[in-house]
Image (spheres, rainbow, N blue to C red):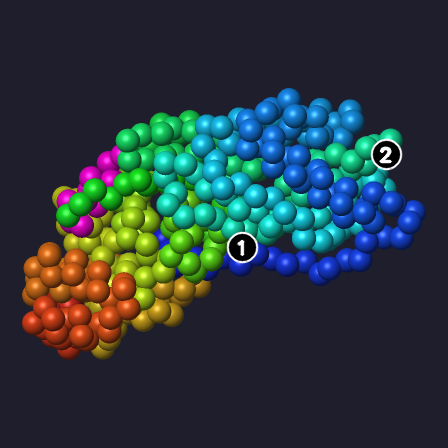
Amino acid sequence: MVTGVLAAVLVVGRVVDGPYVAAPPATSTTAADPAGATRVLEDLEDALADGDAAAAAALAPAGDAASADLLESLVDNARRLRVRDLDLRYVDVVRVPDGDGGWAVRADLTWSWGGVDSGVARSEVEVGLRSIDGTLGTTGFTGGRVPLWLTGPVLVDRGADTLVVTAGADPAPYSTLARRAVPQAARVLGASTGPLVVEVPADAAGLDAILGVPEGTYRDVAAVTASVDGLLSTSSPVHVFVNPAELGRLRRTGAQVVMTHEAVHAVTGAPTSRAPVWLVEGFADYVALRDVDLPLSRTAAQVLALVRQDGVPGRLPGESDFDLTAPHLGAAYEAAWLACRALASIVGEDGLVEVYRRTSEGEDVGVALAAEGTDLSAVTAAWQEQLRRVAR
């Protein structure tokens, strides 16, 4: 199975809100004074926006070289990613001082990346603070849905239609996949589909963290397409997020299919698509596998095995079949892909693209199919016959 693990395409991440904790009494006047935190956040925002690494480093607690280095790296990240629309605003206290004077506040964060993001991302983050000798400093971003560029040093590779950001790994292999994916998607969609933005955290735990989900959620997933801030809004930037361990296990063809599949999701705004899930996933695989010269015995092996065991399914795969915990997740992806192939055999590739576009915008699938001269029962019958024939 090449793409069956890519089950988390319509990610609706949610900021995890910790309980509000009242500021401590006068024994810690800095923590009790939100204005102190506000000033630190404003200074950090200014340093990031102005590209002032020295000013950022000076915001670290006295004697904390690690935090100073981290804050300097964030300024460098912001410069290379051309961060725009930056705003960091105090909300409340989420953690009271511990033994070494460290505490944390919650802040609203907005940002975008110049040249690639048409909208602005919004997230709620936690910022670590510490007072040394009466001077308040910050240790950086310590919780919430923290974007990759604010977690530590990143490497950036920018192409004509692509932007790849990694947490230290060489971005070149991912850039190669991304730069091939853009024209592959354009050949079917009929227009330039860039820019494609790909983010690669250090590991699966890092992927879960920047997507704001429990650790282990995407451990077995090679890549995910999601809005950067997890909000179901057409204004939120949409990027591809890679699990480097899982993608790294695939051969070159498999890795390219994964990247092209996710590129289709990203450039068509799949996180906010209102099309049936079988059409969203099947269409992405239709594009990704269109020019792959492999037999169906390999690209549809799981669903064909189920057909031989249980017979032809009575319906197209539903939303629950694409849940990460579904027992036959890979087969559901393959079935959706074959359904889109069956639809294309009836209405042509242009017709498939039009049905995908219209349903993604909210039109009922029956109405969209009727406009192309067919209906869901005809598509289902063609799909079932295809399964039956190939399974033999």
Query: Considering depth in this image, is 197 or 390 the residue closer to the camera?
Result: 197
Residue furthest to the top in view is 54
Judging by the rendered image, the residue that carries numbered circle 2 is 134
Q: Would you say residue 20 is visible in this rendering?
A: yes
Magenta stretch?
179-189
Type of amino acid at the residue the image marks with label 2: Gly
> Which kind of residue does numbered mark 1 sit on?
Val
Give coordinates of residue 36: x percent, y percent: 77, 42
Q: Specify the principal SS of the magenta part.
A: helix
Q: Where residue 356 sits in the image (x, y, percent)?
A: 21, 61
In the drawing, does residue 37 fall left or right of residue 239?
right
Residue, x 11% and y 57% (percent of image)? 350
**In terms of depth relative to the viewer, which is nearer, 102 or 90?**
90
Could you say where residue 337 lies in the image, as x and y percent from the top left?
22, 59
Confirm whether the magenta stretch covers residue 185: yes
Q: Is residue 104 left or right of residue 370?
A: right
Q: Check the picture and name the quadrant holding the C terminus.
A: bottom left
Label 1: which residue?
213
Instruction: Decide which of tag 2 and tag 1 comes sooner along the chain.
Output: 2
Task: Work out how far the residue at label 2 is from the one at label 1, CA to CA, in angstroms.
Answer: 36 Å
